[in-house]
């Protein structure tokens, strides 16, 4: 089984905390690390970049990667996995793909994600269930200029939320929280009544200045979100 970037990241962090690579030390270069872990250099690069984003190491071009003398404390936003959220509540998770469409980005989305005219996107609509009860309706757009492999991905059994988290990191995120009312379509997807009050979030994620995806998540009536930083 291939080594994942999370396993590489965890092992590097363990070596740092155990003093194998103390503060100020250079860690081995990506080629040597890839050879030692038996994985691709890209896997190591992603692991080290996340450690840099976490403020654990400092990367400098041509100077290598050093363990920081003092870790930088910063707020980090983790993209939640809806499956985990549902299972953590003790419920059984189920997912349904409602619609999948390859198309040119609509004008409003092009402006939001800075997609050029005629830029292609993948539009997905999904429902996530907790114990057979609709929990969340996911309306997602993926920028195929940044992530063309999404056009070939099979979202029949795995939701785009999980696929994206496993496929590409993100460097920036913008999230909005809204109150809305169920229209006829949302009421049907969420098993509620039209005009019911609903909680909704909108999120855009970027990788190195380019928008990856825009998603609107709408929850069943009475949903409560709790976040800890």
Image (cartoon, grey):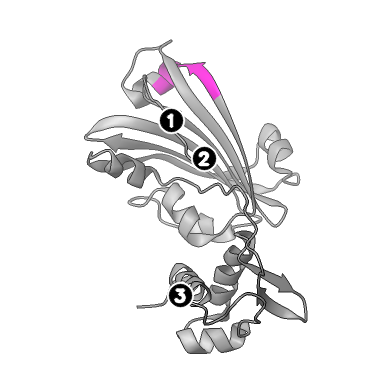
Of residue 114 and residue 89, the one placed in the foreground of this image is 89
Of the two numbered discs 1 and 2 on the same chain, state the one appearing first in sequence: 2
Of residue 89 and residue 106, the one placed in the foreground of this image is 89
Residue found 50% across the figure and 47% down from its top:
79
- Percent across and percent down for residue 161 are 45, 48
- Tell whether label 2 touches label 3 (CB within 8 Å): no
Asked if the stretch drawn in magenta spans residue 103, the answer is: no
Q: What kind of element bears circle 1?
A: loop
Residue on which the image places disc 1 = 225
Q: Which of marks 3 and 2 is in front?
A: 3
- Left or right relative to 195: residue 53: right
The disc at residue 46 is none
- Left or right relative to 94: residue 48: right
Residue found 55% across the figure and 27% down from its top:
177
Of the two numbered discs 3 and 2 on the same chain, state the one appearing first in sequence: 3
- Percent across and percent down for residue 44 are 55, 76
- Figure label count: 3
Residue found 22% across the figure and 33% down from its top:
132
- Percent across and percent down for residue 219 are 41, 27
Q: Residues within 10 Å of mark 2 (few under 14, many from 20)?
A: many
Q: What kind of element bears circle 3?
A: helix
Q: Which residue lies furthest to the right in this view?
A: 62
Q: For the residues marked 3 and 1, what is the alpha-carbon distance in whole angstroms? A: 32 Å
Q: For the residues marked 3 and 2, what is the alpha-carbon distance in whole angstroms? A: 34 Å
Residue on which the image places disc 2 = 140
Q: Residues within 10 Å of mark 3 (few under 14, many from 20)?
A: some
What range of the chain is rendered magenta? 178-186
Of residue 87 and residue 152, the one placed in the foreground of this image is 87
């Amino acid at each position: 089984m291939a080594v994942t970037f999370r396993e590489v990241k965890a092992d590097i962090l363990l070596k740092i905390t155990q003093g194998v690579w103390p503060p100020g030390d250079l860690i081995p270069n990506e080629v040597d690390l890839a050879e030692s872990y038996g994985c691709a250099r890209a896997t190591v690069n992603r692991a080290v970049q996340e450690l840099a984003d976490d403020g654990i190491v400092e990367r400098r071009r041509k100077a290598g990667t050093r363990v920081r003398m003092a870790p930088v404390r910063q707020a980090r936003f983790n993209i939640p996995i809806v499956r985990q959220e549902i299972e953590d509540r003790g419920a059984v998770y189920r997912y349904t793909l409602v619609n999948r469409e390859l198309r040119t980005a609509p004008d409003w989305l092009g402006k939001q994600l800075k997609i050029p005219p005629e830029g292609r996107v993948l539009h997905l609509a999904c429902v996530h269930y907790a114990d057979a009860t609709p929990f969340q309706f996911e309306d997602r757009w993926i920028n195929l200029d940044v992530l063309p492999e999404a056009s070939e991905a099979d979202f029949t059994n795995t939701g785009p939320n999980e696929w994206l988290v496993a496929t590409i990191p993100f460097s920036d995120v913008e999230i909005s929280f809204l109150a809305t009312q169920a229209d006829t379509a949302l009421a049907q997807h969420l098993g509620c009544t039209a005009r019911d009050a609903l909680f909704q979030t909108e999120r855009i994620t970027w990788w190195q200045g380019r928008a990856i995806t825009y998603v609107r998540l709408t929850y069943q009536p009475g949903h409560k979100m709790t976040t800890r930083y």
